Image (cartoon, grey):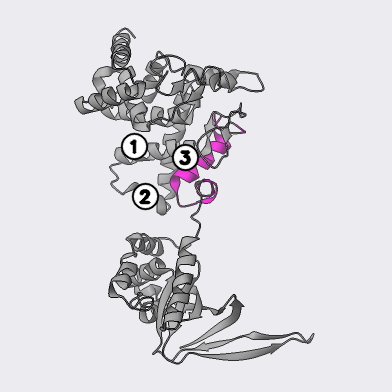
Amino acid sequence: MKLPAIRGNIGVWTYYVSTMSFSDISKYVKEINDELHKSTTLSEMIQRSITNNYKNIKKYILNQDERFFNSLVLAVYAGNPQWVEVEIDYDDGEEFFNMGFLKLNGEEKIFPVDGQHRAEGIKRALEEDLSLSSQSVPVIFIGHSTDDRGMERTRRLFSTLNRYAKPVSMRDIIALDEDDIVAVITRELLVDHQLFKNDRVLDSKGKPIPEANKRAVTSVITLYDCNKELLKYFKVIRNDKTRINDYLRLRPSDTDIEDFKVFVFNYWDSFMKIDVIQKFLNTNEDSPAEKFRNRNNGGHLLFRPIGLLPFVTASIELKRRNTEITIETIFQEFDKIDLFLNEQPWIKFLWNDHEKKVIAGDNQLVKLLLMFMYKPDILKENEFKKLDSKYKGKLGDVKEAEGILNELREKSYHI
């Protein structure tokens, strides 16, 4: 096998940049065996590090025409690899000596130092579709030695490439991903929906909103998470049993995207009619969110990420348990319930009234409390037991907690 390549150097490594076809990856690149450790146990530990993620890569290859990969880093040893340099001399006298051919006689042993899952995904995809044989991926070859020093050096490179690889941030996924339908529709909301466009959604690395921000209704990551919950219900309605994470990896059809867009926009259109949201939208103040999110009284549950996401999941669950009722009607009923944090049941639960700060919340517990406030009997027996136990634990006063829950139960019957 003769591969055109560019030779380079970094640190102690000489490397060769080239490409390999899928068929050559399948034929020549083998899983790591005893190349990094003499111990069978340690070698097996590395083999077991290959997770089922290769299945997702296989699906990506088989279903995404715009597929692309980062370079595989492949270690080569044994055989008789040779570098044949090709001198290139331009008219201006500039010469290049780092281009040429890497010749492999087929007896070399090649294994991935970085890209084990990609290599395995390529092999599995090729098993299902031989027409992919001529597809090629970028590769970087490095030399490997099976003596103690060589193993140590390659182990260090293996751990460096894998330890310091930085996952794509959620902000980047939301801003750029064209396969993740939730990211696609979240961007549409930021551009076209009255509640979220302009600066009404905060671009931040996390969900919390800084105290200084007085304009945003929520953060972009919280909005994404809310839309992800809407997708789960959307899939239930369509009887789509694809696992949510698998669904987000492959771009759906344009029809499915449009259907989900309509579903999401309709949800937030109805949400926008909630009284407190209308007040937020209709204010002429420079800091429209200040009265709904502040240190004085905590503000309103819907303007806190710890409240908005559970509110969305609660509304979806209420709709799921009563398909005859509309989301808009559910929101109208919630409009009758006090969701300001300086009122019960939120004091000591989500709002520290003495220190004037938010208390870390459990999304599932907040969801159950919202459902209980909406209609106590909607909770299943095990759900109420969980709510009752954890609410008492959060307040630290059993009698006070029982009194609050009983009062909420009575109130609900008079709404």
Q: Position of residue 358 (x, y in %)?
A: 48, 26
Residue 68, compared with residue 185, is above or below; it is below
Left or right: residue 287 versus residue 245 is right
**Mark on residue 245?**
2
Q: Position of residue 267 (x, y in %)?
A: 43, 30
Q: Is residue 194 magenta?
A: yes
Which element type, helix, strand or loop, lies under badge 1?
A: helix
Mark 3 → mark 2, Cα distance in angstroms: 14 Å
- Outermost front residue: 148
Q: Which quarter of the rendered picture does the C terminus lie within?
A: top left
Residue at x 37%, y 79% (from the top left corner): 35
Which element type, helix, strand or loop, lies under badge 3?
A: helix
Which element type, helix, strand or loop, lies under badge 2?
A: helix
Q: What is the three-letter code of the residue carrying label 2? A: Asn
Which comes sooner in the sequence, label 3 or label 1? 3
Q: Which quarter of the rendered picture does the N terminus lie within?
A: bottom left
Q: Nearer the viewer, residue 414 or 61?
A: 414
Which residue bears the numbered disc 1? 233
Residue 238, compared with residue 402, is above or below; it is below
Q: What is the three-letter code of the residue carrying label 3? A: Tyr
Left or right: residue 173 versus residue 384 is right
Numbered range of the magenta stretch: 171-199
Say few, some or many: other residues with alpha carbon within 10 Å of mark 2 (under 14 / 14 to 19 / 20 or more): few
- Outermost right residue: 92
Which comes sooner in the sequence, label 2 or label 1? 1
**Mark on residue 224?**
3
